[in-house]
Amino acid sequence: MARKGSLTRELEIVYRLRYQRFLRVATAILGDESSGHDAVQDGFAQALREQQSYRGLGPLDAWVWRLVVNAALAARRHRVVRGETPEEAEILGSNGQSGDESGVRAWIAALPERQRLAVYLRYYADLDYRSIAQALDVEIGTVSATLSSAHQALRRSIEEVER
Amino acid sequence: MTETIDQLLQVRFDAVANHVDDHDWDEVLTRSRSGASLVSTRSTARRPRRWRISTRVALVATAVALAAVVTAVAFGLPRTFINFLSSPPAPAHVKNWFAAENVEAPPGMNPKAIPGRARKIASATFDVNHLHGNHPTVHTLYVAPSKGGGFCYLWTNADAGCLPTKAPSKTRAMRAMGPLGISWFSNHYGAGYPLFVDGWVRSGATKTVQAHFADGTTATIPVTWVSAPVNAGFLIYPVSSAHRTRASALTSVAALDANGNVIGRQHFPLTKPLDQNVTQTLPDGTKVSLERRAQAARARKIISFRTTTGSQAYVWVMPRTGGGDCYIFNRGFGCLEPRFTAQMPTLGGVLSGSTNPPLLFFVQAKPDVAAVELRYQNGERERLTPIDGFALSEITPAHYKRGTRLAEAVALNREGRAIYTQHEQPDTVGVYPCQTPKSLGHGVKACP
């Protein structure tokens, strides 16, 4: 019981310190801040409920990242199943951001899913490669290769616009 | 090259950073205990097809899905229970409205609503005016939790309010209100009794909310209860035509516990005919809305000057039937009973016109105030001489920028000695006009 209480406290600390980063990534996945907030809340709620399944093999952050990203992806799948998802680039570009900002979001929205998630975690959450690997449950080498592919695609997009 | 693109992306991603902080650990705990996937249930509620059904049906369907109790609908809101976390998110313009409430609140009164968490609770059809026949329209209730445990609500095109997060100092009347927070509407000319009430009741011991009438009758007011983190019920109650006379008027709303004991009551004292607002005519022919007690025909224009915008600034003062004075200036009016005048501070000044210049500083001062000195941040001073206890000055564009704004209003006695100082808050956002309002997020712009 003591460990459970201690983990709850640690989760609360991670939440309070990193909420903005979690929100940025979840919002990026879902396209609107309200849904992003829900995904963060659900991810942490699941972490509280299932803290027995955290075996302490990696950083607590990375485990929670996986839960939050999965909550966001699950929410998006629900929308897709129900035919509710407008094009992500469209949502992201229509929320009052400047053209430059919505352009960045649109380029990322056009990436394949794994590249997109890796980019979100790298730049929105500022995670290092090891943490991204743990959050996405892949090898570090895979993160490196995925981000490299994403960089190439994004560089092409940026160069096209700035040419 | 990878490093270059990495740095470039970092810069661009910083530009799309989210600046809204609406974290809420208590809500995480609530969700963890409920065990439900809120995102998926909310997605169901957001189905466009759902919202094509009539609102009443949608509300009932939501309630049934939540296995909540639904009882008969009297009118206005159904008596039901709404799971806040399963309710659909508010649209952007509503979130912006809550954000604007935070920004535009007077200093120290920011309700700290969390715009990003605003949700749509219910819709209902009612006539907020109830004046000339019945012209009901659809109104929607949105609620946003606020930091510290309170909430704010908005009935579109009707009313809005907040449960303050900090308990205000408790007056006797406020203690009597208990868990209730009720607004009431009369008509433009002051019918003297409520035509419509709305508001909230905090969850807890309250089981029933009742309307009490001057003729001794009562009626139950339906309440829509909203779950954590709001933990409150919302009510609207258009007063029926049978209770729109002084003899049968709504006189109070009471919160009752499970045993029928009154645990809070809000009274609506009948407005005396002389205190009702009526259209009156000033000596120069201007039509104004003033209390019947204000003797507009005897009004004197005591201050008049042209502002930097070319408009005319003015103050009229007139006697009040029963004692005291009434006044009207460009941006407001009021009447001062002798007993209230005695309770007033030595000096009371208010700035108005931030969004619609000229920016005016209106002052009410007690008789022992011989002069009012306006002291600006840049050291400049300006002296006003109250006339019949009133003064009015324009804060010119030369004092709009930070560092030049009004810092203090000092009351001076006949010997020139400072007897009272009103401290201004010159760095408060949204008080002074500017050329380019600054974005504060959620579409809210305000002058710094």
Image (cartoon, coloured by chain):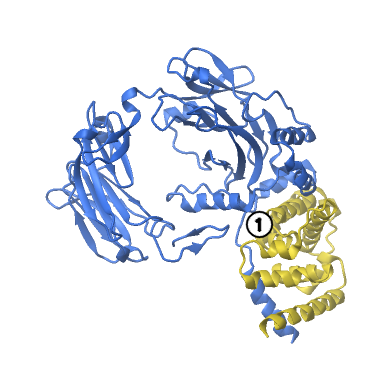
Chain colours: A yellow, B blue
In this orientation, does residue B233 appear? Answer: no
Name the element at disc 1.
Answer: helix
Quadrant in the picture for residue B289:
top left
Q: Chain of mark 1?
A: A
Q: Is residue A95 above or below residue B77?
A: below
Percent coordinates x, y for residue B384 in the rendering: 20, 53
Residue for point 41% across, 33% down: B188
Disc 1 target residue: A16
Q: Is residue A92 above or below residue B122?
A: below
Residue for point 79% across, 76% down: A150
Foreground residue among B362 and B91: B91
Foreground residue among B439 and B139: B139
In the image: residue B50, left or right of residue B416 = right
Quadrant in the picture for residue A126:
bottom right
Foreground residue among A99 and B257: A99
Percent coordinates x, y for residue A88 in the rendering: 75, 63
Percent coordinates x, y for residue B181 in the rendering: 52, 32
In the image: residue B305, left or right of residue B213 = left
Percent coordinates x, y for residue B149 in the rendering: 59, 43
What residue type is disc 1 on?
A: Arg
